Structures are given as C-alpha cells and as structure tokens.
Amino acid sequence: MLNVKFGVGALHLNTPNVGLKPPINYILKYVVHGIADIKLGKTQTCRFLPAFEFAVQGPTTLINLGTNIKYVLQDRSKYTGVYSEVALSLGGWYRVG
C-alpha cells in the first residue's frame, strides 16, 4: 500500500504592514510539502513515512528532508469509529544547508 500526500501554499499574499516604526512589510512565502505512507511487510503494522518541505521567502530558501518509522499498536475501528489508531513513531529530520 502506498499513500502519497502533497501540499502547496502561498503566505502573505496581500503583503501586510506590521505597523512598526519604520513600517515592515511581510515578504511573500511559497511552500511545497509532501509525505508518503509506505507499508512494510505483508501487514500494515509497520510503515515507512518519508517526507519533505521546501519553502522560499525572498532570498531565503528552506529545504527539510525527513522520515519516520511507524509501528501501529491498535488499528482504528473501520465501521464504528469508536477506537482511534494507537502507534509509536521514531524518526528524524535534516535541514539541507
């Protein structure tokens, strides 16, 4: 099973004035991020979750890469919604540059 999610965002579109003296305007910021949920083995109890984040604001660029290993202790109930998923996760992130 492979589940992939992506997102795109734009922040400060109207370049608001902070109202300080001297006035400071926010710079437009663009963000792209994503995560994949990859099943390991025949069951879905162990999963690999690689992710990334890429952001640009003016002259500044931010790149974050990371991953988690997720072990599901209890699945959520499929029909009643009574039980939530219970899991343990361990991972790390790296900021490029």
Image: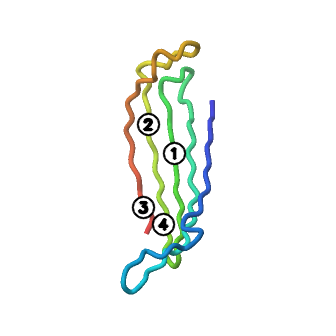
Q: What whole-number distance in Å separates the C-alpha atoms at marks 1 and 2? A: 9 Å
Percent x, y of residue 53: 52, 57
Amino acid on which disc 4 is placed: Leu
Mark 3 and mark 4 in contact (Cβ < 8 Å)? yes
Front position among marks 1 and 4: 4
Q: Amino acid at mark 3?
A: Arg
- Residue 62's disc number: 4
* Label 1 – label 3 distance at C-alpha: 14 Å
Circle 4 residues within 10 Å: few <14, some 14–19, many ≥20: few
Check if mark 1's residue and mark 2's residue have beta carbons within 8 Å.
no
As measured in the structure, the alpha-carbon distance from the residue carrying label 4 to the one carrying label 2 is: 24 Å
Which residue corresponds to mark 2?
Answer: 69
Q: Nearer the viewer, mark 4 or mark 3?
A: 4
Look at 37% across and 79% down and name the residue there.
20
Residue under the image location 56 percent in, 54 percent down: 33
Instruction: Check disc 3 and report the residue beneath it.
Output: 95
Looking at the rendered structure, which numbered label has been put on residue 50?
1
Residue 82, image x, y percentages:
48, 15
Q: Secondary structure at mark 1?
A: strand
* Quadrant of the rendering where the C terminus is positioned: bottom left
Disc 4 on helix, strand or loop? strand
**In the image, is 76 to the left or to the right of 9?**
left
Residue in the picture at 61% in, 43% down = 5
Spatial distance from mark 1 to mark 4, Cα to Cα? 17 Å
Give the mark nearer the N terminus: 2 vs 3.
2
User: What is the three-letter code of the residue carrying label 2?
Assistant: Ile
**In the rendered view, how is the structure colored?**
rainbow
- The crowding category of the residue bearing disc 3, from other C-alpha atoms within 10 Å (few below 14, some 14 to 19, many at least 20), is few
Position above or below: 46 against 36: above
